[in-house]
Image: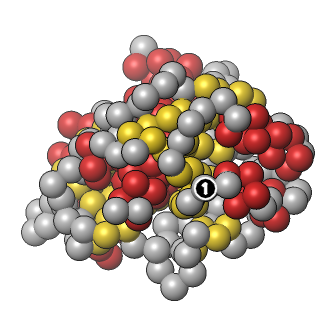
Amino acid sequence: MSVLSFDIGGSKIAYALVDAKGTLQTEVVTQPTPQTSDGIEQILQNATTQYKYDACALATAGVVFKNKLQSKPNNLPKGYENINWSAIFKAPYIIENDANAAMYAEYKIGNLRGVKNGIMLTLGTDTGCGLICDGRILHGKCGATGEFSFPFSGRDLKRLAAEHGATQTDCFAIHAAAQQGDAAARAAYYEWEENLVAGLKLLNALLDTEIFVLSGSLSKIVDYAKVATTLALLQPHNPADVKPAICGTDAGIIGAALLCAESLQ
């Protein structure tokens, strides 16, 4: 089976053909996200003419429930929520929240593989959260599970840097300066790290998870050994492991395709 799978976010649209095992069959095509819903539709329609496929999958920002986008995501243009997906794909398709899709890739072929209860947090400009509960994606009553603004996004790190008087405005520059001993950058980064640990502690207290997997660009600046050790000291009765995601930037495409393929079996 070949699934034409898309990952649509506020800054880029990526797509590729993926097989039922989650293997990319083509190179991933990436384009900037247009400023209009018509522009997004055009990219999708063009893609559907380039490949032969059995089904389509869509990982998208926003709340998704029962294969429907519930409202317009904040980072996508007006009218996006009204796109007629069936008219574009002309094949069986599924829609899933992008954080859930990326998490599912990790669940099937990444660092969540083999667990029954796990959480994946996406650390980028904003934050995303996906939860595996008893071996299934947890959606909640309307698909909004995990849709929470955790205080350890890229925006938060930049805000903390400004508050502490750091001169750096890029998250990776802030982290690099902190590693080099810059007092203001170090104070900002450590507060950001404390917020991350506090968030993991709260989620683990509520959900008693086996593991946290961290994805997104800012997952690269996390001190995993330190965070995991601190979390275990704070919660010695039910410590959770903390690891980086391994499926990379293609996780949304792969996870959505896997969900699609399984839904048609």
Residue 18 visible in the snapshot: yes
How many numbered circles are shown? 1
**In this rendering, would 112 be left or right of 35?**
left
Residue located at (11% from left, 63% from top): 236
**In this rendering, would 48 be left or right of 264?**
right
**In this rendering, would 154 be left or right of 11?**
left
**Where residue 160 appears, x then y in whole percent?**
60, 41
Q: Quadrant of the N terminus?
A: top left
**Where residue 95 appears, x then y in whole percent?**
57, 60
Q: Residue furthest bottom?
A: 141
**In this rendering, would 145 be left or right of 74?**
left
Q: What amino acid type should be assigned to the residue bearing mark 1? A: Ala
Q: How is the image coloured?
A: secondary structure
Query: Is residue 126 depicted above or below 202 in this figure?
Result: above
Residue located at (88% from left, 57% from top): 78
Residue indicated by mark 1: 91
Q: Residue furthest top?
A: 180
